[in-house]
């Protein structure tokens, strides 16, 4: 299969199986045999078509005689794929986009289907001026079409952050995600790793992160996880914003800590790297197969101080109470900060689901707090943008737990650039997707007195 055919198959599976696009895409690329350039095109087509679904469907429903939703799944996704290339990918000549899309219709359907696809795409090109949208949308409907997000989410972002901040967030969500790596300083320096990766991927732009002193940002290259350096544990794949969490925990060698909801283990392994693999970190997850992932990551990175355990973070053993120098709760959340990386979230998440997860977050926070010894640190983090899950959750906890207080030195654990751009909210900081073209994250640091 070529790049477009692989992309179409992923889109079909994404809709029919309601799978996660990032996982489906990774699996498809591993099996595809595509070269670096075609893998990049497949990735752009999959993420772009899902990200821009609202806009694409608006166009297609005006071009079709029947409702887009009445078509077979494969044909619906093929039309979205075709219009996405015509509307958003200037580097692909329109003739090539039309030809390739029609050819796929012939391979999957019959002549009538191919004629339909050909007619729709050529009609789009003839009537291209009809599809122009305002540069500065005013109504919520216009916002939904220009930025391709559901109306309820747009209203929520504008209410919380104001129009200008919301606009920048929505634009950032539609940009392709960068590949960011976290150096394992126990095995290699960041500078040496950048040199090694630059030799392996000479076509890539590889730079040191401005967000984390262990971070590396890579654009335009191949798959770094296919390298011997990855297999030898020289680095992990982790978003730049996510790297800030362990930095805020700031564990020291010899300490004892718990990562309460640790899978797949990115933050847990980062914590142990900062501990110089000295001390003990117990990394819990409720699912045994996810604990296996944590252990495999620790093994690859050469970390012996990390102990992966299956357990429910709502019900820790009393033997752990007040025994930990630090506890990290990276809570399950709505994931609104990672839409760039997981575009399915904005189409599948509902306002009701956010309300439903709040009691679980509160219960987990109360449970994690029991493990912290006096003078110890409790860090709460999420990859979402909703205040109810973030600063309001922490404020509610503090109101009922007088033995905890915000760390007055919290900002000292953050790089200067993060302090300048981030939004200090309550006891923590909110990183928005456009601040560093990274995931949106909330991080709060509390001390038990």
Image (cartoon, helix red, strand yellow):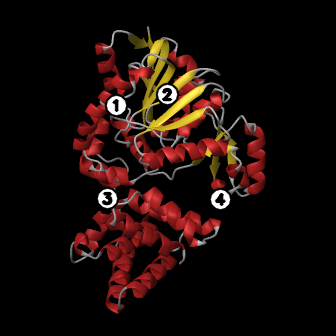
User: Of callouts 2 and 3, which one flags the residue occurring earlier in the amino acid sequence?
Assistant: 3
Label 4: few (<14), some (14–19) or many (≥20) C-alpha neighbours in 10 Å: many
What label sits on residue 222 in the rendered view?
Answer: 4
What label sits on residue 314 in the rendered view?
Answer: 1
| Cα–Cα span, label 3 and label 1 | 38 Å
| Residue 64, horizontal then vertical, whole percent | 26, 76
| Cα–Cα span, label 2 and label 3 | 42 Å
Note whether 411 is above or below 38 in the view shown: above
The answer to whether 289 appears left or right of 346 in the picture is right
The quarter of the displayed image where residue 166 is located: top left
Q: Secondary structure at mark 4?
A: loop
The answer to whether 287 appears left or right of 215 in the picture is left
Look at 47% across and 69% down and name the residue there: 7
- Disc nearest the viewer among 3 and 4: 4
Label 2: few (<14), some (14–19) or many (≥20) C-alpha neighbours in 10 Å: many
Which corner quadrant holds the C terminus? top left
User: Of callouts 4 and 2, which one flags the residue occurring earlier in the amino acid sequence?
Assistant: 4
Note whether 153 is above or below 62 in the view shown: above
| Cα–Cα span, label 4 and label 1 | 41 Å
User: Of callouts 3 and 4, which one flags the residue occurring earlier in the amino acid sequence?
Assistant: 3
Asked if residue 220 shows in the view, the reply is no
What label sits on residue 54 in the rendered view?
Answer: 3
Look at 26% across and 76% down and name the residue there: 71
Label 1: few (<14), some (14–19) or many (≥20) C-alpha neighbours in 10 Å: some
Work out whether residue 114 or residue 401 is closer to the camera in this orientation and state it. 401
- Disc nearest the viewer among 4 and 1: 1
The answer to whether 417 appears left or right of 339 in the picture is right
User: Of callouts 3 and 1, which one flags the residue occurring earlier in the amino acid sequence?
Assistant: 3
Look at 34% across and 50% down and name the residue there: 346
| Residue 436, horizontal then vertical, whole percent | 53, 38
* Residue picked out by circle 2: 258
């Amino acid at each position: 299969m070529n790049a477009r055919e692989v992309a179409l198959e992923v889109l079909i599976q994404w809709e029919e199986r309601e799978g996660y696009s990032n996982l489906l895409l990774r699996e498809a690329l591993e099996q595809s045999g595509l070269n670096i350039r075609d893998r990049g095109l497949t990735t752009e087509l999959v993420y772009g078509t899902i990200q821009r679904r609202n806009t694409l469907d608006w166009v297609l429903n005006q071009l079709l005689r029947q409702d887009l939703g009445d078509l077979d799944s494969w044909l619906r996704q093929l039309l979205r794929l075709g219009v996405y290339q015509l509307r958003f990918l200037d580097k692909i000549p329109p003739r090539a986009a039309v030809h390739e899309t029609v050819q796929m219709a012939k391979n999957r359907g019959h002549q009538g289907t191919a004629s339909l696809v050909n007619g729709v795409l050529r009609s789009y090109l003839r009537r291209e001026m009809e599809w122009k949208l305002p540069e500065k949308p005013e109504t919520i409907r216009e916002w939904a079409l220009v930025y391709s997000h559901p109306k309820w989410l747009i209203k929520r972002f504008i209410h919380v952050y104001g129009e200008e901040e919301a606009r920048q967030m929505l634009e950032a969500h539609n940009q392709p995600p960068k590949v960011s790596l976290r150096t394992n300083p126990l095995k290699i320096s960041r500078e040496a790793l950048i040199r090694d990766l630059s030799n392996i991927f000479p076509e890539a732009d590889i730079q040191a992160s401005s967000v984390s002193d262990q971070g590396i940002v890579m654009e335009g290259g191949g798959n770094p996880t296919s390298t011997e350096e990855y297999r030898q544990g020289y680095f992990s794949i982790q978003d730049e914003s996510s790297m800030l969490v362990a930095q805020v925990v700031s564990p020291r060698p010899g300490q004892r800590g718990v990562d309460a909801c640790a899978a797949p283990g990115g933050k847990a392994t980062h914590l142990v790297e900062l501990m110089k693999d000295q001390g003990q970190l117990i990394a819990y997850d409720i699912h045994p197969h996810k604990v296996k992932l944590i252990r495999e990551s620790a093994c690859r990175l050469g970390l012996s101080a990390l102990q992966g355990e299956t357990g429910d973070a709502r019900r820790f053993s009393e033997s752990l109470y007040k025994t930990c120098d630090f506890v990290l709760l990276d809570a399950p959340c709505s994931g609104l900060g990672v839409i760039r990386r997981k575009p399915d979230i904005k189409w599948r998440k509902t306002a009701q689901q956010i309300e439903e997860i709040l009691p679980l977050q509160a219960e987990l926070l109360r449970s994690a707090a029991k493990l912290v010894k006096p003078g110890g640190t409790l860090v709460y983090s999420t990859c979402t943008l909703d205040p109810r899950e973030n600063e309001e959750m922490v404020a509610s906890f503090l109101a009922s737990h007088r033995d905890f207080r915000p760390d007055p030195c919290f900002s000292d654990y953050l790089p200067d650039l993060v302090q300048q751009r981030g939004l200090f909210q309550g006891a923590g900081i909110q990183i928005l997707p456009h601040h560093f073209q990274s995931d949106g994250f909330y991080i709060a640091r509390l001390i038990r007195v």
